[in-house]
Each structure stands twice: as C-alpha cells, then as structure tokens.
Amino acid sequence: MDAMMKDLTKGNETKAIVLFSIPMIAGNIFQQLYNIVDTVIVGRFIGPSALAAVGSSYTLMVFLTSIIIGLCMGSGVVFAFFFGAREMEKLKKSFFSSMIFILAVTVVINVLALVMLDNILVMTNIPKDIYADTREYLLIIFTGIIFVFVYNYFAAVLRSIGDSITPLTFLVVAALVNIGLDLIFIVGLKMGVEGVAWATVIAQAVSAVTIAFYSFAKMPEIRLTFQSFNWDGVIARHIANHAVLTSVQQSIMNLGILTVQGLVNSFGVTVMAGFAAAVKIDSFAYMPMQDFGNAFSTYTAQNMGAGEEERIHRGIRSTTILITLFCIAASLFVFFFSENLMQIFVRKSEADVIAVGTQYLHIVAAFYCLIGYLFMLYGLYRGLAKTWMSIVLTVISLGTRVFLAYFLATQTSIGLVGIWWAIPTGWLLADAFGFIYYLRNSKKLLAFDLGGNYADVEDSNIQY
C-alpha cells in the first residue's frame, strides 16, 4: 500500500480519525484563504460596496458548486466502501462511472448558470448599486466551474483510499497562486472585482490540473485498466444513488443559506457587508468540524466495507469528544475577539458594518458545538449509505432556519437579530433528531451491504 494511503479499518480509532482529518483541515484552511484573501483585499482596497458584491456572490457560487461537490462526496462513500472491502476492480469501475456522470452534470450546471444569471440575481434581491459588480464577478467565476469538478473529483478519489495529504498539497499551491494574483490584479493593476474573480479561477485551474496529473501519473491504485471501462449497471446505480442524494443534501443546505442571504440583502448594503465578513469568520471557525465529519464519513464507509461495526461505534464516541473540545475553544475565541476579527476584513472606520458582524458572531459563535455534531451526523449517515437521512437532517436544520428567519425578521421588536437566532435553533433540532434516530436504530443501520443485501432488514422497520 502506498505510504500516502491509510487503512482506517485498523488501529486506534481516535488516532486514525485525527491523522486522516488533519490534512483535510489544513486543506480547507487554504481553500478558505481563497475567499478570505479576496474579502480582505476587496474590503480594504475597493470598499464596502464591492465587499457586499463579492460576499453575496460567494453564497450563490457555493450553492451551485455544492451540487458538484456533493456528487463527488457521495461517490467517495462508494469508493471507500469498495476500498475497505478490498474490491479493487469494482473500485476502479466506480471511478469510471462517477467521472462520466459528474462531468455531464457539471456541463449542464455551467450552461444553466450562465444562461440564467440575470434571473438568479433578481431572485436574490441584489441591490442596484452593486448589481453590475456582482454580475461581472459571477460571469468570470462560472467559467471555472469545470475546475471545481476536476479538483473535487480527484480529491474524493484520493481521500476514499485514505490519502488526505495529496489534496492538501495542491490546495497549498493554489492558495499561494490566488494570494499572489490578488495582489497583482487588485493592488497593482487596479482591476477591481474582475481581478478578484480571475485570481480565484486561475487558482482553481492550477489545483485541478496538478491533482489530476498526479493522480494518473503517480497512483497505480486508481489508474484505470481496460476492464474498468466496462459499464457496470449495479455499480453505476450505487454511484448515482449516493452521489445524487449527497448532492441534494448539499444543495438543500446551500439553498437555505442562499434564501437567508436574500433576506439579509433586503436590509441594505451595510448589513450585507457585515454579514459577508461575519460569515467568513464563522465558516473559518467551524470549518475543522466539517472536516471531522467528512473524515468520519470515509472512516465509517471503509469500516462498513470491512464489516467492522464495533469500530464505527467507538469512532462515534471519539469524534463526539474531539468536536466538543474543539468547539468550546473556537466558541470562546470568536465570541471574545469578534470585533477584532471583523476589523481584519473591514476598516475600523466602518463602525456600522463591524457592529452588524459582531452582533451576528456573539449569537452564533456560542453554539458551534451544535453545528459540529450536525457535521458528524452528516458524515455518519453518508458512511452508512443512509444519505437520505442526511437530507432529512438538512431539511430540519435549514427549514427551521429559513422559517424562523423570515418570521422573526418581520417582528418589530426582534428584526435582524431574529435571523441570527434562527441559525443555532435549526442546528439544535436537527441534532436531536439525528442522535435519537441513531440510538433507536443502530443495529439496523449497521446491517447494510453495498452489494444489495440488507441482512433481512427493511427500512420500513426502522423506528423514528
């Protein structure tokens, strides 16, 4: 086995999850640098209007690319299952099936995004004074959607076989390219919002091309053979099932966020700018918890393939402890230093913008444990091939958030602060449902076999 690959079915559970998670966390940090550097430079060298344009564009961009990323993540569950079961030829066939399927979806998304861009901007309440900047930014960003697919596809392949270090390497390179081009295009050439977009697209292209070349050239375990190109209908159905359901879950999550963004936009540019900066801080703070959840998904799928049910139970306990400890530290740091963190993105003179972001962080940061547990539950159910359960949890979380946000924001005595309180409320309800469901049905959930045998267990017997 290649030194980069990790067999998550053996050894200490906590150590396995932590070591596998660390490169993913580091990689996500560099990925967040794409957006954080953009935000800092835009906020300080262009101004609040451009910051609002890039911030609102980011939410829309994440929604569309989440479809592709979700397909890659879902396929990764199938890859990890076959790797854990040591079904290497089936593993390679699943690579071929998923690549063709996700590529086709990516092309469709790219065309639709470009054709419907103006309609999308109107639906999300983009103010007239930043409409042109937002449109220009997104037109350029959408040209790079194919690179989002390529990078995330090969990252999912490598992580499914236990290699979480290689995707990190290429993200580091891309992040450095992104930072350098930001400085050249924005500070040096004064290209404005257009420069921010081109820096991001070029950096994405670098990460995509380099990881694809490495994967084919250096990893014989994933190199396709002639037999791998034979279409296997059973494997293709499993790929489509898990990939589509994971994509739906990711899309619902980001659609809910996009809906809330539309509500925030109705409060004006100051609130939009404060929210844009605060969300960057927010997502950076709890991003490692998302990576623990994604790592746990691969851990669970590999152990399901190997039939190691008890390791999954022990892994849940280890991951819960890890998330709790990290979240407490993150919550305390963001809560007490929220104003200082806002000033990284916004000039100190923009007091109103800082006040909005600080208010948001004081409420949401106190409940990071709740989103951490939710990420773990998403990973657990994906790894158990119960991705539909992740969709249920997402609907509960985002449905609550959207309903409460729109209801509370209209109450004169509550207003904007109601949008912030709706977020942790949704997390809490989804966590409660996810944990109760698992505790009542763990034996049935662990009886699943990807080959189509359910060990005489029917989903209809599962208790709610």
Image (cartoon, rainbow, N blue to C red):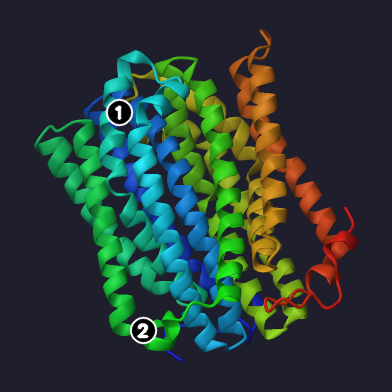
Vertical arrangement, residue 42 with respect to residue 450, above or below: above
Q: Position of residue 158 (x, y in %)?
A: 44, 74
To which quarter of the image does residue 4 belong? bottom left
Q: Is residue 335 left or right of residue 182?
A: right
Numbered tag placed on residue 219 in the rendering: 2
Vertical arrangement, residue 216 with respect to residue 181, above or below: below
Q: Is residue 146 left or right of residue 11?
A: left
For image coordinates 64% across by 21% down, the residue present is: 406
Question: How many residues crowd around disc 1 within 10 Å: few (fewer than 14), some, or many (20 or more)?
Answer: some
Q: Is residue 273 visible?
A: no
In the picture as drawn, the residue positioned furthest to the top comes out as 412
In the picture as drawn, the residue positioned furthest to the left comes out as 189
Mark with earlier residue (2, 1): 1
Kind of residue indicated by mark 2:
Met
Kind of residue indicated by mark 1:
Arg
For image coordinates 29% across by 76% down, the residue present is: 214
Question: How many residues crowd around disc 2 within 10 Å: few (fewer than 14), some, or many (20 or more)?
Answer: few
To which quarter of the image does residue 28 belong? bottom left
Q: Nearer the viewer, residue 223 or 266?
A: 223
Q: Is residue 367 visible?
A: yes
Vertical arrangement, residue 141 with respect to residue 362, above or below: below
- SS at circle 2: loop
Numbered tag placed on residue 250 in the rendering: none
Vertical arrangement, residue 50 with respect to residue 303, above or below: above
| Marks 2 and 1, how far apart at CA | 40 Å
For image coordinates 56% across by 83% down, the residue present is: 83
- SS at circle 1: helix
Q: Position of residue 132 (x, y in %)?
A: 27, 22
Q: Position of residue 349 (x, y in %)?
A: 33, 19
Q: Residue beneath label 1, please?
A: 135
